[in-house]
Image (spheres, rainbow, N blue to C red):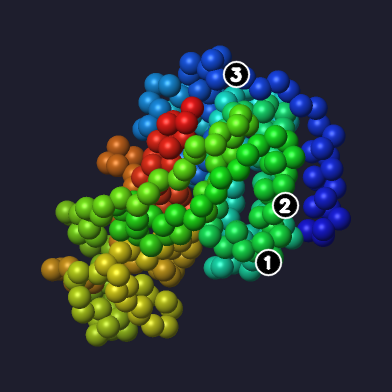
Amino acid sequence: MKVANLFRIKNNLERMPLTKSMNSSDIKILKAIDLFAGIGGIRRGFQKVFQDKIKFVFSSEIDKNAQKTYQLNYNEIPHGDITAIDEADIPSHDIILAGFPCQAFSVAGYRKGFEDTRGTLFFDVARIAKYHKPKIIFLENVKGFVGHDKGRTFEVVKRTLEDIGYTLYYEVLNTKDFNIPQNRERIYIVAFLDNVENFTFPKPLEPIITISDLLDKKVDEKFYYNNKPLYEKIKDDIKSSDTLYQWRRHYVRENKNNVCPTLTANMGTGGHNVPILKDKKGIRKLTPNECIKFQGFDESFKFPKDLALSHQYKQAGNSVTVTVIEEIAKCIKNVL
């Protein structure tokens, strides 16, 4: 998208009317909306912390398969394309949760940023925030978002939110520092409408959970490479049962930090990027259920039974790490 178009969107935001925000004393139960909801990882983290003090009044997710998983776990079918939904049709709310699409800013992609239509979806968050003026906006994206286009992309986002009255806090956190053994760096942005001076992001937790703690006890034979063509290519390189590996199309990469490599959305495409391990039965890839556990989901989370494995892997890789969200939500709760 050209710069002229980018600022045309921003100018449209500036012409939108402001609405009155709620005072802290008015809020007993926080109303929340879940945008670019995926399988509800951000929602799940906030629900664990706020419990009955948070009520979700709206959700949006364009992927039909993710909608099915969301419905199964939250008994709610998300609305579709947020760009086609008028902000006035969204219920009033106190919190916006939005893990807006990250491919436009990812090192793994082409890093086109706002030139990519997915990159402009941030402005849908902004137009909704300008209309409803929620007390809190919570955003998540890839680490590369911070430095994209020499920091200019992030500066546009920061300035846009500040122009409509928000104070921003942001930090890059790694999943492996929050008691889930996965190397996953993401930027988290918390924006407050009211003046909040004592908000801080969570400090790393003492690691307790190991890779072996998150592995399934029983694994279907279909996840094993034994007696399959790929086995001959990888058998000599996968030696240790104490760590995870990745098949990178032409070679095996060992993770020497005793954590899971970053789970990605393309894990279900031809086996590429799915972490691999060695156990007593042979060499296999992680199951989708294991991938979900490496994202901090508990055993209550379920995939639809008829959902293809490729979609399960994609949804796990696209998700956030619930335990990191929980820790940030605790910090938000402390300052409310």
Give amino acid for label 2: Val
Image coordinates for residue 35, horizontal then vertical, percent: 58, 38
Which residue is disc 1 drawn over? 150
Give the SS element for disc 1.
helix
Of badges 3 and 2, nearer the viewer stands: 3
Which residue is disc 3 drawn over? 23
Badge 2, how many Cα within 10 Å: few under 14, some, many 20+?
A: some
Badge 1, how many Cα within 10 Å: few under 14, some, many 20+?
A: few
Compared across the picture, whether 87 is left or right of 331 comes to right
**Mark 3 / mark 2, whichever is N-terminal:** 3
| Residue 211 position by quadrant | bottom left
Compared across the picture, whether 164 is left or right of 269 comes to right
Residue at x-position 60% and y-position 43%:
168
Nearer to me, 289 or 19: 19
Which residue is disc 2 drawn over? 156
Image coordinates for residue 277, horizontal then vertical, percent: 25, 69
Q: Is residue 201 above or below residue 111?
A: above
Q: CA distance from mark 1 to mark 2?
A: 12 Å
Compared across the picture, whether 314 is left or right of 85 comes to left
Give amino acid for label 1: Lys
Q: Are marks 1 and 3 in contact (CB under 8 Å)?
A: no
Q: Can residue 36 be seen by looking at this rendering? A: no
Q: Can residue 15 be seen by looking at this rendering? A: yes
Residue at x-position 69% and y-position 65%:
149
Image coordinates for residue 23, horizontal then vertical, percent: 60, 18
Nearer to me, 219 or 117: 117
